[in-house]
Image (cartoon, grey):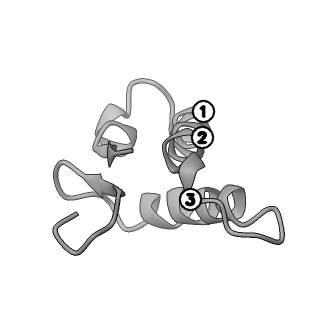
Amino acid sequence: MLAGYRGVIATMWSIQDKDAPVIADHVYAKLFKDTQQNSTGAALALHHAVKLLRQQVGDSAFLSWVPFIHVGV
């Protein structure tokens, strides 16, 4: 955010290598689904991606889906 970005998707701790592509693929697919980039929906895109990951790994595997956060606008 110090570089001028209004929002950032991050993790609160280390994540597993198999979880990152699931989140990234779905976040970027949602952000770029229209022909024009729309970064204002980043938090919602992350929410949907985490929901999908949570369905894949199960609620008890919370260390996989809990670390992902959106900070900013």
Answer with mark 3 or mark 2, whichever residue precedes in sequence.
3
Please give the residue where the numbered disc 1 appears in the rendered image: 55
Please give the residue where the numbered disc 2 appears in the rendered image: 56
Query: Can you give x and y, in whole percent of width and height, for residue 47 in the image?
Result: 53, 37
| Dot 1 crowding, Cα within 10 Å, few <14, some 14–19, many 20+ | few
Discs 2, 1 touching: Cβ within 8 Å:
yes
Res 65 → quadrant: top left
Q: Quadrant of the C terminus?
A: top left
Task: From the image, state whether disc 3 or disc 1 is nearer to you.
Answer: 3
Res 36 → quadrant: bottom right
Amino acid type, residue under disc 3 in the picture = Ser
Residue at 54 percent of width and 43 percent of height? 53
Residue at 29 percent of width and 56 percent of height? 10
Amino acid type, residue under disc 1 in the picture = Gln
Marks 3 and 2, Cα distance to the nearest angstrom? 25 Å
Relative side of 51 to 38, left or right:
left
Count of numbered marks: 3
Please give the residue where the numbered disc 3 appears in the rendered image: 39
Residue at 28 percent of width and 39 percent of height? 63
Circle 1 SS class: helix
Circle 2 SS class: helix
Residue at 82 percent of width and 63 percent of height? 34
| Dot 3 crowding, Cα within 10 Å, few <14, some 14–19, many 20+ | some
Q: Nearer the viewer, residue 11 or 61?
A: 11
Amino acid type, residue under disc 2 in the picture = Gln
